[in-house]
Image (cartoon, rainbow, N blue to C red):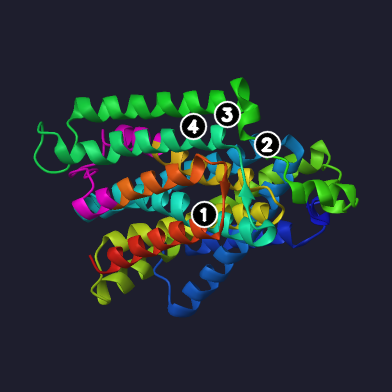
């Protein structure tokens, strides 16, 4: 943990940036923004992402793993769900597939992008990235099950035409998602917490023997951690709120470029997952690849496990269809991601090759989203 965690969050930029970003959100909310205002909001958005990562690390250093990863993953996902529901309520039929597009984009970004970057950084640092196969394997199995139940099955059901759930099927998917999410959290934080803790590597032992300060920094005080938790929530609200503020510009740009509507969901997912991506890469640089995987898979589980129930509840008042089923290309990419991820996780060790394979899968998904 860097020395930044030992300073009071009231004394540096990490207090000012979330507040400024929140002020920018208040002035931009519900307004049509000119180009210069969009640029300022985007700058505030980037600053809020960096501040969120800092405060998440302060909280994580205080509460320890895997609770630290859980705080950031759940906080980001809850606000992401609010963003999706808000956009769907405002958008009508043209946002019928927004939940599916955003959730699937989150799964691909976390399971391929965050995992790939983390393995790449970890392997570059220590030649081999080491992690706990038991915990990561359990998380991957949960992601795969949630994704198939919520995003694949609707394509093949026959109760309603198109890739939709009937009311009863949607209710079952929502309850199943919540049950699996709750079970995973119980296993991660209570029954088998040790499966999700960073493993001791040879490089880590050498650094500890040399007395490097990075691994021995004092945890922040309870007061500093509580302040950082509050500022983390403020920063995440600013991230997602400013992402919504610039979304009309994003939608207009996507439409003028002749790109599919699904690209909007991809961009939203990239924006809201930026804090987790940066936090995961920084953890991998400190030889804590397990923490990076906790962030990646935990975010994917939270994204599905919280979004589907929220959308099911919102469908009571939302009008228009709710398209959840994936197309053939995306189902193939999902299947390939699950197979490759399983082969990556089972050994408990990964090299540059595995990181590169995951990043190539993400690149393939992004390319096919733009050019289906």
Q: Secondary structure at mark 2?
A: loop
Within the magenta stretch, is there residue 320? yes
Q: Position of residue 245 (x, y in %)?
A: 44, 62
Circles 1 and 2, Cβ within 8 Å, touching? The answer is no
At 62% from the left edge and 64% from the top edge, which residue is drawn?
Answer: 47
Disc ID at residue 65: 2
Residue at the limit of the structure toward the bottom, as seen here: 36
How far apart in space, not on screen, are marks 1 and 2 (Cα)?
Answer: 18 Å
Mark 2: give few (<14), some (14-19) or many (20+) Cα within 10 Å.
many
Disc ID at residue 138: 4
Q: Which stretch did the figure color magenta?
A: 305-332
Q: Is residue 71 left or right of residue 265?
A: right
Residue located beneath label 3 in the image: 188
Disc ID at residue 114: 1
Closest to the observer, 93 or 128: 128
Labels 1, 4: front one: 4
At 22% from the left edge and 65% from the top edge, which residue is drawn?
Answer: 372
First reached walking from the N terminus: tag 2 or tag 4: 2
Within the magenta stretch, is there residue 323? yes
Mark 3: give few (<14), some (14-19) or many (20+) Cα within 10 Å.
many
């Amino acid at each position: 943990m860097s020395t930044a965690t030992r300073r009071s969050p009231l004394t540096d930029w990490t207090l000012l940036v979330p507040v400024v970003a929140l002020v920018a959100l208040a002035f931009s909310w519900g307004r049509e923004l000119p180009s210069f205002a969009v640029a300022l909001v985007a700058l505030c958005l980037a600053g809020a992402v960096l501040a969120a990562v800092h405060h998440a690390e302060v909280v994580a250093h205080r509460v320890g793993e895997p609770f630290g990863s859980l705080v950031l993953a759940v906080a980001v996902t809850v606000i992401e769900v609010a963003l999706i529901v808000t956009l769907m309520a405002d958008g009508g039929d043209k946002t019928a597939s927004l939940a599916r597009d955003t959730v699937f984009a989150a799964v691909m970004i976390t399971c391929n992008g965050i995992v790939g970057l983390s393995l790449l950084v970890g392997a570059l640092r220590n030649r081999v990235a080491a992690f706990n196969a038991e915990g990561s394997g359990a998380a991957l199995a949960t992601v795969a099950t949630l994704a198939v139940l919520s995003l694949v099955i609707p394509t093949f059901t026959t109760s309603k035409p198109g890739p939709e759930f009937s009311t009863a099927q949607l209710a079952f998917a929502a309850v199943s998602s919540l049950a699996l999410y709750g079970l995973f959290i119980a296993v991660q934080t209570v029954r088998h917490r040790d499966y999700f803790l960073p493993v001791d590597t040879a490089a880590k032992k050498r650094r500890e023997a040399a007395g490097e300060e990075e691994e021995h920094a004092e945890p922040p005080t309870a007061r500093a951690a509580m302040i950082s938790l509050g500022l983390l929530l403020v920063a995440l609200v600013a991230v997602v709120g400013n992402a919504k503020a610039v979304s009309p510009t994003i939608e207009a740009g996507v439409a003028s470029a002749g790109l599919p509507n699904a690209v909007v969901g991809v961009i939203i997912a990239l924006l809201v997952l930026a804090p987790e991506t940066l936090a995961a890469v920084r953890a991998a640089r400190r030889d804590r690849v397990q923490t990076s995987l906790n962030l990646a898979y935990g975010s994917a589980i939270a994204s599905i496990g919280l979004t589907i129930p929220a959308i099911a509840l919102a469908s009571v008042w939302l009008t228009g269809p709710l398209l959840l089923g994936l197309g053939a290309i995306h189902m193939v990419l999902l299947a390939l991601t699950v197979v490759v991820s399983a082969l990556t996780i089972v050994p408990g060790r990964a090299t540059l090759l595995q990181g590169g394979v995951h990043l190539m899968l993400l690149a393939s998904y992004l390319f096919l989203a733009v050019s289906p």
